[in-house]
Every structure is written in structure tokens, then in C-alpha cells.
Image (cartoon, rainbow, N blue to C red):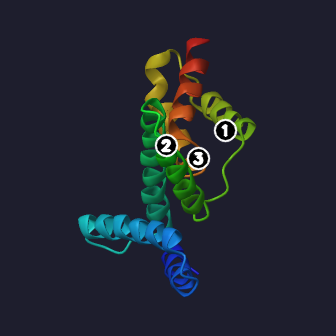
Amino acid sequence: MTLLELLNKDMITSMKNKDSFTLGVIRMAKGAIQLESINKKKELTDDEIISVLSKQIKIRNDSIEEFAKANRLDLVEQNKKEIEILNKYMPEQLSLEEVIKIIDEAISLIKPTSSKDMGLIMKEVTPKVKGKANMAEVSSLIKEKLTNI
């Protein structure tokens, strides 16, 4: 079953259960997927859908920070619940140790000489961790390792 089929199935289930919150989140996700599909002028693959969903999760994480600063705890909780629902459609997240191992493999393969080689390492690491790890954290881990070279 593709990710889009799973979203459609869960949307129908949410309608039957009269779960308006989950239904709203799924509809929002489908809207973002449909917009990306229109922009690319083709049906999206599961990997592309995962990319769209991870962008939606990132947006909500950023919103949580802003709402927390404004002391809007109701909106913080709402965004956390939305992230929880969206995470059901994401691949299992890699542990910190797994991400570090992937970064170390890329570094040993590329043998960077300075922090200017970060782009090469990111190019090697990104396909292996995209959607499975927070890319901002991956980037900072790579920077940290390159400063020690």
C-alpha cells in the first residue's frame, strides 16, 4: 500500500469515527502533497511524499518554538498532536548512533581536508538519512566533526 493510499484509508476511518482533529491533519497533509504534485506536474513517489510530510513537521516544530515564546500553550499542544499524527506516516527515525555511523562512513569515504568539504559529505549522507533524521541536527553533527579535522 502506498503512502497516499494509507492517507486516504486513514481519512475515511477518521470520518467514520468522527475524529475531526485527525481528519483535519490528514486533509492538510493531502493538500500539501497535492500542491507539490501540481508543482512537479506528476504523481509523487513515497519518498517525495515523505519529504513533503517532513517539511510539514518542520513547520510545526518551528511554530511550537514561537508559540512557546508567546506563552500560547494551547497552540503548542495542538501542534504537538499534529506532529504525532504526521509521524505515523514517516519512516522509523534513526537513532543518534546510527546517524553518527553514517556520517563517519561518509567522512572515511570522502576524506575531507577542511570544513569546505561539508557539501560533499552532505551529498553523501542526505539520501541515507532524509526523512529518517532531523537534517538540521545532521548538518550540525557534520560541522562538528569537520571542525575537529
Instruction: Tell me the residue at 35%/69% (across/down).
Output: 31
Is 104 placed left or right of 39 in the picture?
A: right
Q: Hey, what amino acid is under mark 2? A: Asn
- Of discs 1 and 2, which sits in the foreground? 2
Label disc, if present, on residue 99 of the rendered structure: 1
Which quadrant, please, contains the N terminus? bottom right
Label disc, if present, on residue 42 of the rendered structure: none
On screen, residue 64 above or below 30 = above
Nearest to the eye among marks 2 and 3: give it. Answer: 2
The image position of residue 132, as x and y in percent, is 60, 50
Name the spot of residue 30 as percent of width and height, x first: 40, 71
First in sequence, mark 3 or 1: give its number: 1
Task: Tell me which amino acid carries mark 3.
Answer: Val
Residue that label 3 marks? 129
Badge 2 element: helix
Residue 91 lies, in percent from the top left, at 62, 59
